[in-house]
């Protein structure tokens, strides 16, 4: 008998010298007394305390299946977080969309998402997205004006 992660697994073995099975069907578990007068109720309570035994192949298959489900759930969680970040970024109200914590209700209800963003901005206005407006003094500004130009001076057009 082997025990793996709390699940007992048994395999019947034959005694090579006598050819008999080593599993004793009439064996009394330790701590129990053999009393034939107890009836069916006593027999049922003994079965309830014994853990179920599954073959090793079934246990391994179940573990593999559960591992696949855990990987799927992890992938779904990752995609849900990415979708939440994209939805917050699409509002254009926050400088960094990851500032709003993930909530599944935001994925299903756009009004809840908008309310959460507005609430966050009311509490922390420094997280608001800033837009540059007006002339900031950078970039190509075209011809600068009517001042003297060296090229024109050389041509003699000055």
Image: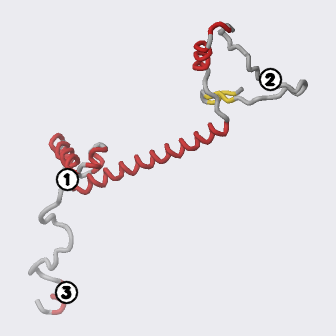
Q: Tell me if residue 30 can be seen.
A: yes
Q: Tell me the SS state at disc 3.
A: helix
- Residue for point 20% across, 53% down: 93
Q: Tell me if residue 33 can be seen.
A: no
Alpha carbons under labels 3 and 1: distance apart:
49 Å
In front here: 135 or 29? 29
Alpha carbons under labels 2 and 3: distance apart:
110 Å
- Residue for point 17% across, 40% down: 123
The residue labelled by disc 2 is 22
Which x, y percent locates residue 66? 53, 41
Closer to the chain start, of discs 2 and 3, is: 2
Alpha carbons under labels 1 and 2: distance apart:
74 Å
Among all residues in the image, which is located at the extreme right? Answer: 17
The residue labelled by disc 3 is 151
Please state which of the two labelled residues, at mark 2 or mark 3, is closer to the viewer. Answer: 2
In front here: 133 or 60? 60
Q: Tell me the SS state at disc 2.
A: loop
Closer to the chain start, of discs 1 and 2, is: 2
Please state which of the two labelled residues, at mark 1 or mark 2, is closer to the viewer. Answer: 2
The residue labelled by disc 1 is 93
Which x, y percent locates residue 117? 20, 47
């Amino acid at each position: 008998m082997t025990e793996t992660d709390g699940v007992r697994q048994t395999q019947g073995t034959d005694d090579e010298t006598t050819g008999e099975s080593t599993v004793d069907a009439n064996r009394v578990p330790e701590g129990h007394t053999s009393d034939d007068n107890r009836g069916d109720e006593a027999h049922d309570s003994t079965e309830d305390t014994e853990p179920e035994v599954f073959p090793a192949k079934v246990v391994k298959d179940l573990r593999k299946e559960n591992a696949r489900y855990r990987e799927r759930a992890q992938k779904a969680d990752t995609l849900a977080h990415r979708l939440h970040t994209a939805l917050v970024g699409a509002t254009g109200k926050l400088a960094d969309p990851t500032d709003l914590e993930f909530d599944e209700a935001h994925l299903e209800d756009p009004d809840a998402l908008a309310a959460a963003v507005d609430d966050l901005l009311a509490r922390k206005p420094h997280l608001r997205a800033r837009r540059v407006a007006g002339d900031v003094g950078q970039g190509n500004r075209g011809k600068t004006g009517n001042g003297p130009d060296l090229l024109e001076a050389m041509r003699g057009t000055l």
